[in-house]
Each structure stands twice: as structure tokens, then as C-alpha cells.
Image (cartoon, grey):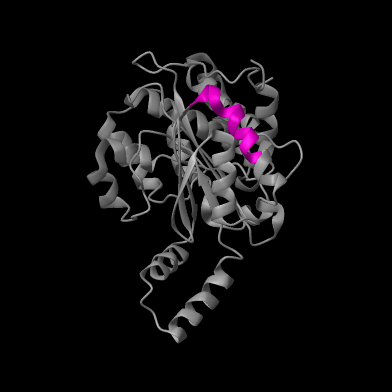
Amino acid sequence: METLRATLDPPIPRDQRGELRTVGVEIELTGLGVGTIAETVARLFDGEVSRETDYLARVATDLGEFRVEVDLHLLQRIGKSRENHSDGAVVSALRDAVASVAERIAPFEVVTPPLPYTELPRVDELADALGAVGGRGTHAGLLHAFGLHINPAPPDMSAATIHSTIRAFAILEPWLRKRSGIDVSRKLTPFVDPYPAAYVERLLVQEVAPAMDRLIDEYLRYNATRNRGLDVLPLFASIDRDRVMAAVADPRIKARPTFHYRLPDSRVGEAGWRITDEWRLWLLVEEVAASRRQMARLAEAYAATLHGSSAASAQQEWAERCEILLE
């Protein structure tokens, strides 16, 4: 199997309705305000900007609504407060001082609507345009642990498909981390922590998908957090929100029928960076998930590596061995 697919096509390109599968993209960046980001989106996608606050705008396009916002709850609250026009001079000055500090570290974010995956080259164009007007990604500074989030809709919502995708990601995660070259700023933060070793070992021997309720419960037992390279909480919340929220009382979890792939860095402003290349890395997960033979071969080899190496060296050894096995 080739390391990366030559095309943007997933191994299963259409969903159960026969329609092209969709993918949403979230790009975190700094260096630009909400207005400039929204105007850039509107220019490229022939959209109309609706500005709600200093920190939130929407762009209506033929492909759906893009959202541009600051990914920090404090600034969102400040933006709403400014719209009320009811604060006194002292409160306003204090609020603006807090905002000026927070803006230096908070990621600004553009969120696409669910797009047919064939539209992803246009998101490359958007990233290039944002970089051209001063947008920068995680390499802009040590405090800028900014990510690119890719949200692919699964080909179907069966326990078997979801389980095989999680299992394939768990097997490939050490290699994906090595291949992606994750910035130190994100390694030092918990936003993309790996799956716990106990969960990975369980997945390696679990060849057959459990029933959906057990699949969700097992995931929640080990991953009651959004901070994973592959966050499945939004997908599971779209299936059984009460079950998820009982284990993870986090209002930021948005129920949606997609995987939430959070591993890649945002590299806006860097020459040669392509979101479509990050998509191709994700497709390798889907390639393994769709191949029972390939999955079994990799799971057996990974288990042997874990049992034959120390905990400190097993991940690095597997990442290097995985590179060879994927050729």
C-alpha cells in the first residue's frame, strides 16, 4: 500500500445515501482580526459577511455558512458585553485592557461548513490567502499552540465503521505524530494527548466491534475529554448525547455526526503547507480501517512491539517500524 493516496478520494467516497462524503475544516491562526478573516472568506467564496460582535462573524455562501470567531470564552463574553453598550467608562477600560492581553494568545478561528471533500483545494486557497494578508499558525510563537481540525463525516454510522476507524487511528497514531512533526508548543499542552496505553492495548485485541452502547462506554472510560488527537465525543454525542454528557460535562462538546481529527498543526503562512496533504494523512487511517487484512497485520505488529520494548521506547520504535510496513 502506498504511504499516501495520490488523490483526495477516500476508500469509501460516498455515504449510504450515495452522496459524496463531507468534511468540515477548522483553521486556528493569529495575526488577523475577525473582520479581515471574514472578508477574506467572503472574497474567495463570494459570500456576505454578517458581523455579530468584535469576536464573531458569519459568512453566508452557496456552500453554507462559514463562522469566524475567537476560540476563547472570555473574549466571546467581552464581545457580547461591548454590544450591550451599558458599561461605565471604568468597566469598559478594564474590559478592553483584559481583551488586549487575551487577544495575543487566543486563537482566531475560521470554521467551514460541511463541504464535499472535492472542495478541499479551495480551503487550501483560503489558507494561502490568510497567510498572504498576515495570518500565522502555531510557529508564530511558543504560546501559539494552534491546530488544524478536520471533521470528516463517516461513510455510515454503524458501530463497525466507527470502531474500525478508532482502531486504525490508535494503531497509526505514533506514526502520524512523527510524520506530522507536531510543534513543541502543542506537545507541551494537553490539547492533542494520545490515547491512553490501556485503551490502545484493548483496541489491538478487539477485532470485532462491540455493540454501540458498549463502544461508547469503553471510549468514555478512557477518553472522558476533548483533548485527543482523534476526538470522537462529537460523533458519539450525535448518537447518544445523554450517555456522553453524563461522563463528560463539557458544554463545548457539539454533537455532530463527524470524527474530530485534531492532530495537525495549523501552519498558516508557511510556504508549501497544504490542508489537502493533512487530509491525505487522515485518509491513511480510513485506508487501514477499510482493509481487514491490513488492520490485522498492523495490529499484530504493534502488539509485538509493545510487548517487546520498554514503555519509553515502544512508541518511537513503532513509529519507525510503521513507516516501513506502510510502504
Estimate the x, y position of residue 315 in percent, counting from the top left: 62, 41
Q: Is residue 31 above or below residue 173?
A: below
Q: Is residue 182 left or right of residue 87?
A: right
Q: Is residue 287 above or below residue 196?
A: above
- Residue sitting nearer the eye, 94 or 58: 58
- Residue sitting nearer the eye, 201 or 176: 176
Is 181 part of what is drawn in magenta? no
Tell me, yes or no, if residue 268 can be seen here.
no
Residue at left 72%, top 45%?
Answer: 132
Estimate the x, y position of residue 120 in percent, counting from the top left: 57, 28
Estimate the x, y position of residue 96 in percent, counting from the top left: 52, 75
Residue at left 64%, top 40%?
Answer: 127
Q: Is residue 273 left or right of residue 287?
A: right
The chief SS type of the magenta part is helix
Quarter of the figure with the C terminus: top right
Quarter of the figure with the N terminus: top right
- Residue sitting nearer the eye, 29 or 223: 29
